[in-house]
Image (cartoon, helix red, strand yellow):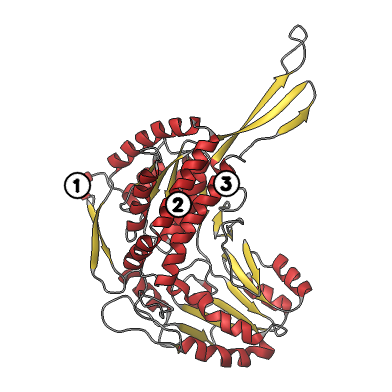
Amino acid sequence: MSYEHENHEDRDTYVHEHQVLNPATEEVVATVPAATPEDVDAAVARAAAAQTRWATLAPADRARLLRRFAATVDEHLEELAQLEVREAGHVIGNARWEAGNARDLLDFAAGGVERLSGRQIPVPGGLDITILEPLGVVGVVAPWNFPMPIAAWGTAPALAAGNAVLLKPAETTPLTALRLAELALESGLPEHLFQVLPGAGDVAGNALVEHPGVAKIVFTGSTRVGKVIMAKCAARVKRVTLELGGKSPNIVFADADIEAAAAAAPMSFLDNAGQDCCARTRILVQRSVYDRFLDLLTPAIESVVVGDPNDERTQMGPLISKVQLERVRSYVTDDLKAIRGSAPEGPGFWFPPTLVTDVDPAAPIAAEEVFGPVAVVLPFEDEADAVRLANATEYGLSGSIWTRDVGRALRVSGAVAAGNLSVNSHSSVRYWTPFGGYKQSGLGRELGPDALAAFTETKNVFISNVSTSTNSSEG
C-alpha cells in the first residue's frame, strides 16, 4: 500500500482527485475525489456524533442492522465482484469470494453484538464487574491487495462493538469501499457512522492517524509504513493494530504426500498474482525429494493460465500497477536460474509465474517480500535445518508444513515463529479464527472470537457491600 510520509504544509500541493486504473488494460475506470485533512476533520466530528447515538442502541437493534447490511451486500455480490475485477485486477472467481467474505464478516460480527460481555470477579468486601465499552471513532486504513475483505476485517467488528468507522482505502482501489458505504446507508445504518475517505496515504491517511478524535488505527500494508504509523500512534498513546509484510515458508518433508504438496504449491504463491502477505514464497523441500518435487512443480507452474480476469478459466491476473510491476522486475535479475510461465503482452501490468532455483537463502529475492508471482525453492537437510531456514527472515506471518508425521507437524508448528500455520494445507485466513503475525509481520490480532473485544475499553467497577458507616477508602 502506498503511504509516503511527507510534509504538506501548503494545501495547494494536495492532489484533489485520483484516477483509478484497470490493471489488466491500463484504462481509467473512475476518477475519485481525494480527501484533505479538512475533510478528515469534518468526518471525525460527524462520526463522533453518530457513534454516540449508535452506542446507545439496544444490542439486538445494532445486531439487526448489521445483519441487514450483510443481506444488502449479499444482494449486490456480483456488482461488488465486478468492481473488484476492474479496480484490482482480481480474477472473477476470487472477486466473488471476496464479496461473499465481506458479507460473512458482517454476519459473524453481528452475532457477537449480544454476546459482548464483561465478567464478575470474586473480591472481598463487595462485587466487582468489568464492562466492555466502545472506543469511539476507529480509523481503518485498508490495502490495495484485498480491498473488500481486509476493509471488512476492521470495519465489521468495530461497528459491532459500538464504534463509528472511518475507512481510508488505498488510492488505487477505492471503488468497492465507496460502494459498501452506500450499501450501509441503504441498509439503515445511521448516517455518518461508516464513512469512506479516499485519498493519498500521506494526506488523508496521515490526517486520520494523527487526529486526536480517532481512538484506534487498524492498518494493513508494508512493514515500513506500519512503523511510521506505530510511531505516530505512540506519540498520542493511540491504540493500533498492524498487519504487515510476510515471507512465508512452505515446508515439504520427505514423508509428505509429494504429489499433493507439488499440486498445491503453485497457487500458494500465485493467488492474486502473489500480492498476498501470506504467500508461500519460500518453498523449502527436503533434499532427498527435492528433484522429484521440482519435476512435479515445473509443469504446474508453466501451465498456470494468466490473462483476462473476467474469464472464468483464468487463474492469475495482473499486478496492481506499473510501480508494482517494476518492483517485481527488479528482484528477478538476469543472472537468476528461473522457471517461468507465460503472461499476456501489451497493455496491463503483467508478470509471468516465476520459480527461482539454485539461489542463496540470503539473497534479496529469497529474504525480502517481493509481493509478486515469484517464489524460491530451497533444499534442507533435516527438521532442524528446515526450522532454521523457515525462521531466517524478519517476518513471521504465515506458513505451511507438509508431512504425514503428526508428531513432526506439532514440533515444527511449535518451532516456526509465525502467527498462522497450516499442516498439509495453505489456508491462512478464516474469519472464525484469530489472524496476525510475529516479528516484523505485525502487532495484535484480527478476526476470530475476540475480534469485537479489540475495539473496546475494559472498565472495572467495584460495588462495596460493606455498611457505609464502616466503609473506608483503600486508595
Please name whichever residue, 334 or 18, is drawn nearer the observer in this view of the structure.
18
Please name whichever residue, 71 or 164, is drawn nearer the observer in this view of the structure.
71
Amino acid marked by disc 3 = Gly
Q: Is residue 33 above or below residue 459?
A: below
The crowd level at tag 3 (other Cα within 10 Å; few <14, some 14-19, many 20+) is some
As measured in the structure, the alpha-carbon distance from the residue carrying label 2 to the one carrying label 3 is 14 Å
Residue depicted at x 46% and y 48%: 155
Residue depicted at x 74% and y 32%: 121
Q: Position of residue 328 (x, y in %)?
A: 40, 75
Among numbered discs 1 and 3, the one appearing first in the sequence: 1
Amino acid marked by disc 2 = Ala
> Which residue does the numbered mark 3 point to in the structure image?
111
Q: Position of residue 187 (x, y in %)?
A: 40, 45
The crowd level at tag 1 (other Cα within 10 Å; few <14, some 14-19, many 20+) is few
> Which residue does the numbered mark 1 point to in the structure image?
12
> Which residue does the numbered mark 2 point to in the structure image?
71
Q: Position of residue 142 (x, y in %)?
A: 42, 55
